[in-house]
Amino acid sequence: MTAPQIEIQVIAVLVAVSCALPGTFLVLRRMAMMSDAISHAILLGIVLAFFATGDLTSPLLVAAAAMTGVLTVSLVELLNRTGLVREDAAMGLTFPALFSIGVILVARYAGSIHLDTDSVLLGELAFAPFNRLTVWGYDIGPRALYMMAGIAALNVLFIAVFYKELKLATFDPALAAVLGFSPGVLHYASMALVSLTAVGSFDAVGSILVVALMIAPPATAYLLVDRLSHMLALSALLGAAGAVAGYWVAHVLDASIAGSMASMSGLLFVAAYLAAPQRGLVSILLRRARQRLEFAQRMLIVHLYHHEGVPEADRENRVEHLHAHLKWKRSFAERVVFAAGKKGLLERRDGFLALTDDGRNAAREAIAG
């Protein structure tokens, strides 16, 4: 493995971890699409800061992007509070307006510099090792590596310091306000971090795919764990795994690294969506099938109990009659009878179904509720 390959993977992991941490709170607050709005709208801040400084490497670009992100959130909430439009519509009105102004400014006044819309939207991680940081004449590594390491450290520090406040403001903002935790301040600080992370990830993955890295790993972790601390750690781990896997997939296919990273994160989500132990689709379908079978067994023993000892019992308490009385298919009726018999709730005697003592007691309990 060459040095540039190692550098690219380290940067990819830092980008993925940096995005996953604030993304966890976006997912929990059901604000996933706010990351999309912010990642697009901050283009305007970057362009305006570049016009003011004339330097693409100026830290003012990052600060301006963060401020534009906060402005985006403020405008969305301002529109939403008027009651005239819903939050999704407010988002759909705000970020395209800011983004389109940024695109027009880039096309009109910055077409000859490396601030084109493709680089902003798509990014290119393969070029990151070529932009080096030198200190007193010494090459100390890619500039993006240090920027993303700083952003990742800032995200970790922010979450570590305000973990309790963030947790309370996320799950119960009203209680957080009563306790004096200022959920509004935390909210805007979080959005500023999202903006900062998004602009730092531009060179690596662009403004579109950064949304995937912010949302897919936390959404995957949400399906697998319940505790916030576990979700944060697992989100970062899944993001890092998707980043490394995406790099090697792109290497084999000679494709976009950022696109492959986002695809790997998406595949991890699909795997969790299907196979998560408690919340996965397969688990839910199996649970529903089990509940349906259990409910059918209750219906069966109540049916047998109601007809027990009456003249119609010989006709009603037979498997063949369950189709007519309970509208069950023959195969399903056989499954229900077999399951109830296995539990010792009934006995089958030449096609006739008779309750056992346990079955009779279970039927009484089901009727009593």
Image: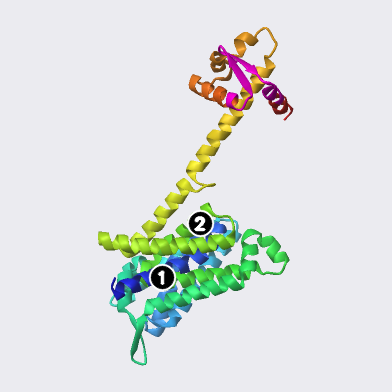
Task: Tell me which residue sits at (62%, 9%) in the image.
Answer: 314
Query: Which of the marked residues, 1 or 2, is nearer the chain's N terminus?
Result: 1
Which residue sits furthest bottom?
136
Mark 2: give few (<14), some (14-19) or many (20+) Cα within 10 Å: many
Q: Nearer the viewer, mark 1 or mark 2?
A: 2
Left or right: residue 119 compared with residue 16: left
Helix, strand or loop for disc 2: helix
Please tell me the numbered disc located at residue 224: none
Question: Quick one: quadrant of the N terminus?
Answer: bottom left
Inspect the image, locate mark 1, and give the three-letter code of the amino acid beneath it: Ser
Which residue occupies the extreme top position in the image? 311
Tag of residue 201: 1
Q: Is residue 320 magenta?
A: no
99 or 55, nearer to the observer: 55
Q: Which residues are magenta?
A: 341-361
**Image position of 288 with respect to 25: above or below:** above
What residue does disc 2 label? 221
Where 235 sits versus 63, above or below? above
Q: Quadrant of residue 178?
A: bottom right
- Seen at 54% across and 17% down, the residue is 323
